[in-house]
Amino acid sequence: MTNTIERTAPPLSYTGPSEPSSWTTYLEQVDRVTPYLKGLARWVETLKHPKRAMIVDIPIEMDDGRVRHFEGFRVQHNLSRGPGKGGVRFHPHVTLQETMALAAWMTIKTAAMDLPFGGAKGGVRVNPQSLTQNELEKLTRRYTSEISIIIGPQKDIPAPDVNTNAQIMAWMMDTYSMHAGFTSSGVVTGKPVHLGGSLGRVKATGRGVFVTGREAAGRLGMDITGARVALQGFGNVGSAAAELFASAGAKVIAIQDQWGSLIDERGIDVRSLASATSGIAGIGGSPNLNDAFWDVPCDILILAALESQMTAERARRTRAKLVLEGANGPTLPDADDILADRDILVVPDVICNAGGVTVSYFEWVQDFSSFFWSEDEINARLDKLMVESLRKIWACADRNKISLRTGTYVIACERILAARQERGLYP
């Protein structure tokens, strides 16, 4: 058989200046917080420059003998407070700028939770559904090998993200360990439990969305029991959050996923949807309802899909009282302003979805000590940390008369830039 070489994605291109990008959104968020940083503002440019960005070529031999090339990234945004921490996503629309923004949001997120990490992120531009299991393993192992020079338990610790899971983390850990010459379970988090993973990790991000949502609802005087919930995205984050809200007595009345939308005022059985093989379409949903989803009268809107979903136009239409950002960067800055003008409370991503990285921290600690906690202990520790962090952020927002997002950035940026200042510059 004659092997052919095929490049599966066009050369790297940047988002055009007239098009909003996740990195542009992040930079605007930093600009908004700068006036509140006082003397630390002299270091703010630190937050606008990733420390390290790596682009790698990933050639693999496909099952049919072809050699295909994929493009991968790993960005370490800031390491002032500790090793990099951030997921790896496999998605056809992964770009360097998106990865930079996601890494930067991880820097803010870990600091907002006061975890001893910096921010990092990785990704491969690929549709993993188009690969066989054998090809997916080859892709994962070659990507890990290419970025192995910058990752490690004390350097940068990857984790699952969009289209990656515990199996992929196991392959990453094994590949890194083969390079190191010994088993290095702490190089990634989100692993299978029997390989050093943590109980409670799979649903941790969704649990964090629920915990912060519960606290925010209480602040608004909203009773979770009977509250109407609309949810965009039904992956690990959205499904876990939906189940927890439903268990607390809320009624999930609208869900949108990649297959379409379903709207039912009587309430949707989220457990049935979780077992449906074709998502919303499998229980009567339709793409024809995707636009109507944004007009559904609801108390709580959970954004748990991808970046830049809440546009200005959708912000004017939404009828929610509380928006919970389960995804990273789902709200554009102009939409944020519109929601604020409409007195719609937004719990920002960098605190709302921080449950995942918090339990990843627990996993990292457990791997170092080789002592593991029960799931009840994990959940109790997570709930306590998230409630304490949110209350500190809320106190900052009230004190400065600023939004919850800006309050989160004030707390986080003060911690990051104080570390930068105290460490100084070398050489």
Image (tube, helix red, strand yellow):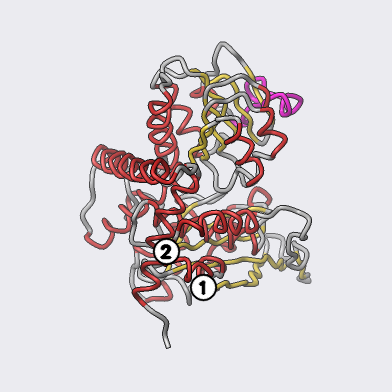
Instruction: Give the residue at x 61% y 56%.
Output: 28
Disc 1 is placed on an element classified as loop
Where is residue 117, by image quadrant? bottom left
Where does the magenta region start and end? Answer: 277-293
| Closer-to-camera residue (349/248) | 349
Q: Are marks 2 and 1 in contact (CB under 8 Å)?
A: yes
| Closer-to-camera residue (395/186) | 395
52 on left or right of 23 = left
Q: Residues within 10 Å of mark 1 (few under 14, many from 20)?
A: some
345 on left or right of 278 = left
60 on left or right of 102 = right
Residue reaching furthest bottom? 427
The residue that mark 1 highlights is: 51
Q: Residues within 10 Å of mark 2 (few under 14, many from 20)?
A: many
- Is 285 covered by the magenta stretch? yes
Where is residue 231, by image quadrant? top right
74 on left or right of 151 = right
Q: Which mark is residue 118?
A: 2
